[in-house]
Amino acid sequence: MQEVFRGLEPERVFWWFDRIAQIPHGSGREQELSDFIYEYFRKLGFSVTQDQHWNLIIRKSATAGYEQAPAVILEAHLDMVCEKEADSGHDFDRDPIRVLRDGDRLYADGTTLGADNATGVAFALSILESETAVHPALEVVLTTGEEAGLTGVKRLDFSSLKGRVVMNLDCSDEGIVVGCAGASVVRLELAGEFERSRREQQFYGLRVSGLLGGHCGLHIGLGRGNANVILGRALAAASRTGGFCLVRVEGGTQNGAICREAKAVFAVEQGDMTAVEQAVAECARELKHELADVDPGLEIELEKIPNQTAVLSQEDSAAYVSLINLLPSGVLEMERDDEGEAKEPSAPQDDGISGETEKRTGEGNNEENNRGSHEEPNKGFHGESALRLAMNHLPETSCNIGMVYMEGSRICIHCNCRSSYGSKKRWLQEKCRLLAACHGRTAYSVLTDYPEWEFNPDSRLARLICREYRAQTGEPLLVERSHGGNECGTFSKRLPGADIVCMGTKIHHAHSPREWVGIDVIQKEYRLLLGALRAMKDYERQEDKSQCTSV
């Protein structure tokens, strides 16, 4: 065990966190971790199945007295986003994650930590091992490829699952999520041809760096800079002088992350050098001014480099500059705020569900404040509350240009199209397709797609967890929707009528090398999960949720 974990409780949660960190498990590379977990629990005598996509299902019988409680699915994903600082020598295919500690914070040495979703996996596996936890029959489902478009859960054999109460452990906040956006990744491939460069051309390297990045669902509402978009604007400034030819362009390594760094090589006529340098410098000043409050570390560097032997034609170069600057990017629509103001309920109706809209605290520029506001209890019957959300300040539809790279002379662009409405997600895909068609010689395809998860105001499970949180802390629990996506949408479609809640550990700066998680929050969220499982004995005794007022 890494030294930073020694002495931490619950010991098995942190043992599993460390064990997961020791095994490389980026998206598409989860087999070693899946095999380890499979063999570990098989040797302990558990019922374990592993499919050809490395998804795992591990079953455990109900503890005494819980035989009649509904079975619970504990669900988490095995893969992590692999992002690192530019000067990091870390190899995600071979090297373990080196976890560091600063007081109550756990973080990694220049890379993503992988707490998304190592905390959820560690929670589930610790409960399987526990001889003291009380719970109904459990089905622990561990999937692969979640960060790469939910590829594993799409191939999961749902017919084998008995449970219809689902606790997804992929939440990245101190609360529960009861709905999320759906998303798809589209790929645009712009065909080009190289031609011989000319002696009269001057070559430049252009680099964008210093951005904060982050999760393209959770943090896109903060208005942070996207290096692919910024690079596109700078290239547009350079190209307006005439005689502009691209050589290379690249940016980003993950579709689910806001691009932090991008770079390009291009050539211009020697007579245009002064104008190009001035245009890029002016563009850099404008962008730094625009992003000063949200991305103060932005750097845009232009330098002369040795001549290259080949360039893309001016026509192909202009097509890319046009396409990257016309593609939709960032938050396109916000959730409608006409759901009504959240109101404080009277004491008899207070069942632990937060009823006030309060500004959330966090580091930086209110990083976590874009996922929605507190949930409003709506008076129902016999003192019960139907869940109601105020959607203020939550992005509804967005597009993230996550990756740009070249395959030979072809330039490939990946756009993450995201919306709370499947129809708007599809319309955003169509906009990308139409732009590709307008540019000619640009192929369009959909790489991944997963559905949104609709909010259920009558969730018994959500109310149960809220009451348990109130009992443990004396405080109301934050109940929200998320613009980030997760596997709950797929579970809701494949298990009609399932009662689903997403819960888990608050993760700061997810999908970036600045990712960290609080030890105290891991401990608190694990206690909440144990308490929620213990409370499942009374799940069926709750009032008929069909009588609750719906939204």
Image (tube, rainbow, N blue to C red):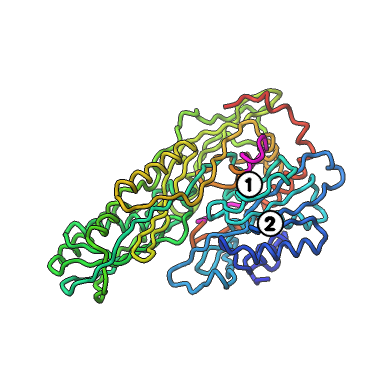
Q: From the viewer's side, name the closer residue of 480 and 524.
A: 480
Residue 157 shown in magenta: no
- Within 10 Å of disc 2 (Cα), the crowding (few <14, some 14-19, many 20+) is few
**Span highlighted in magenta in the image:** 491-510
Q: Which residue in the rendered view is the most extreme toward the left?
A: 271
Q: Position of residue 30 (x, y in %)?
A: 61, 62
Position of residue 221 relative to residue 281, above or below, is: above
Residue 161 quadrant: top right
Position of residue 310 relative to residue 500, above or below, is: below
Type of residue at label 1?
Met
Q: Is residue 453 visible?
A: yes
Identify residue for label 2.
Answer: 51
Q: Position of residue 266 (x, y in %)?
A: 26, 66
Q: Position of residue 132 (x, y in %)?
A: 82, 53
Q: Is residue 132 left or right of residue 443?
A: right
Identify residue for label 1.
Answer: 503
Q: Position of residue 501 (x, y in %)?
A: 64, 42
Q: Is residue 519 visible?
A: no
Name the N-terminal-most of marks 1 and 2.
2
Tag 2's secondary structure? loop
Q: From the viewer's side, name the closer residue of 63 and 470.
A: 63
Q: From the viewer's side, name the closer residue of 446 and 98.
A: 446
Q: Which residue in the rendered view is the most extreme toward the bottom?
A: 306
The residue lying at 24 percent from left, 56 percent from top is: 318
- Within 10 Å of disc 1 (Cα), the crowding (few <14, some 14-19, many 20+) is many
Position of residue 497 relative to residue 236, above or below, is: above
Type of residue at label 2?
Asp
The residue lying at 49 percent from left, 38 percent from top is: 422
Q: Name the quarter where the N terminus is drawn.
A: bottom right
In three-dimensional space, the C-alpha distance between marks 1 and 2, rounded to whole angstroms, equals 26 Å
